Amino acid sequence: MSQKRIEELEKKVRDLKKALADAERLSLIDPLTGILNRRGLEVEVTRALAQAQRQDAPLAVLFIDLDRFKLINDTHGHDVGDVVLREVATLLKKVVRASDIVTRPCGDEFIVILPASDLVVAEHVANKVTKKITNTVFAGKTNVELSVGVSSTSEGVCDFHELRRLADERMYKKKEVSKVH
């Protein structure tokens, strides 16, 4: 085989490896918001939990649900709903630390992973996020209400699925309380 042919094949292999790496990266990203999707969340939370255990540091989870999001879609249309989701994702990334992991696993739910954060820090961040989002007009048309539940490994829970379940449960309790008021 000629040197030129070998170089061509090597280039094709490099191009294929790059395309594969790009496809893998894209499979972790929510195409609407540009933040991590459910698969990306699972990959990153596994890394974050392992690092927290190595450093003997806490890790917290914020489970965020946009309240009555269907009403935004019904009132303003799905295009506006999509803009709201993108803007919420952008705002979340601005409000939390660069080391925090912002994800949209599905629909109008967001999960934020807070490395090196206990329950007190998580509650503080949840309040900051709630205040910032509820005081913002999205898509130039609408406000967004949200419910946030938090959990942390500082509570003795070390499994992500249990942390998520606990934060989700607390989020629903807050949602119920806000319905009463």
Image: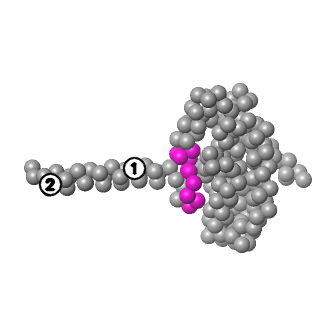
Q: Can residue 165 be seen from the camera position used here?
A: no
Main SS category, magenta section: loop
Q: Position of residue 126 (x, y in %)?
A: 76, 47
Residue beneath disc 1: 21
Q: Would you call the spot at circle 2 few (<14 residues within 10 Å), some (14-19), or many (20 or more)?
A: few
- The span picked out in magenta is 32-41
Q: Is residue 179 left or right of residue 4?
A: right
Residue 110, placed above or below residue 164: below
Task: Name the amino acid, label 2.
Answer: Arg
Q: Would you call the spot at circle 1 few (<14 residues within 10 Å), some (14-19), or many (20 or more)?
A: few
Residue beneath disc 2: 5
Q: Earlier in the sequence, mark 2 or mark 1?
A: 2
- Which coloring applies here? one colour
Judged from the image, the secondary structure of the residue bearing numbered disc 2 is helix
Disc 2/disc 1 C-alpha distance (Å): 24 Å
The residue lying at 55 percent from left, 50 percent from top is 37
